[in-house]
Amino acid sequence: EPYLVHPLEVADLLADMRLDVVAIAAGLLHDIVEDTPTTIERVRELFGEEVAPVVEGVTKLSALQFASTEERQAETFRKMLLAMVDDIRVILVKLADRLHNMRTLHHLSEERRTKIAQETRDIYAPIANRLGMSKLKNELEELAFRYLEPQAYEALRAKVDAKRRQTEGLIE
């Protein structure tokens, strides 16, 4: 089930972004080379010359390890990610993958959650911002904040909820 649900959710996010059939197919297949014995050549054979390079690009990005939280190194890593990509759909699939991973982060150990949340805040949210995807950036940042600073997140969430309850009557 996890091998099916995650790619379906990623493809659904890409469809919500109104991306083309190549991006959606790549979203469905983005983990196949990593998680199964399937080769990129087999993906190319079955899904064509447009889908395979996007899947391959996402696979290569997933293999990169972000080593430091230092801002200068994070900027270098963001530039390297963007420079590696020949097709912007690779980044879009990776962003959708990361968003779904962040939405389901609670299933992982605290150490893994913190590492992934830090990487999301430092690398992926700024890339979404640079691409003008503010809704995606905001959700990535909010999810990262939830795991990196849980007490501050809960305090802020409580204040926002209280303010919302206070002003609901005015909006009605």
Image (cartoon, rainbow, N blue to C red):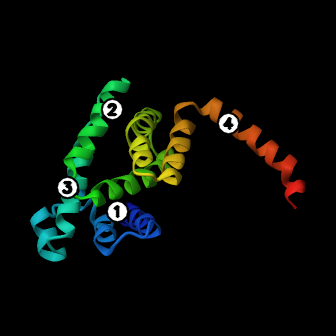
Report crowding for label 1: few under 14, some 14 to 19, many 20 or more residues within 10 A (C-alpha).
few
Residue named by callout 4: 154
Instruction: State the CA–CA distance, disc 4 to disc 3.
Output: 40 Å
- Give the mark, 2 or 1, whose residue is nearer the N terminus: 1
Query: What SS does tag 3 mark?
Result: loop
- Give the mark, 4 or 2, whose residue is nearer the N terminus: 2
Query: What SS does tag 2 mark?
Result: helix
As rendered, which of 5 and 80 lies closer to the eye?
Answer: 80
Report if the CB atoms under discs 3 and 1 are less than 8 Å apart: no
Instruction: State the CA–CA distance, disc 4 to disc 2.
Output: 29 Å
Residue 68 visible, this orientation: no
- Give the mark, 4 or 3, whose residue is nearer the N terminus: 3
Query: What SS does tag 4 mark?
Result: helix
Q: Which residue is located at x 38 percent, y 45 percent? A: 127
- Give the mark, 3 or 1, whose residue is nearer the N terminus: 1
Task: Quarter of the image for the N terminus: give it.
Answer: bottom left
Residue named by callout 1: 3
Specify the amino acid type for callout 4: Glu
Quarter of the image for residue 50 reads bottom left
Report if the CB atoms under discs 4 and 3 are less than 8 Å apart: no
**Foreground tag (4 vs 2):** 2
Instruction: State the CA–CA distance, disc 2 to disc 3.
Output: 19 Å
Specify the amino acid type for callout 3: Asp
Q: Which residue is located at x 40 percent, y 46 percent? A: 130
Specify the amino acid type for callout 1: Tyr
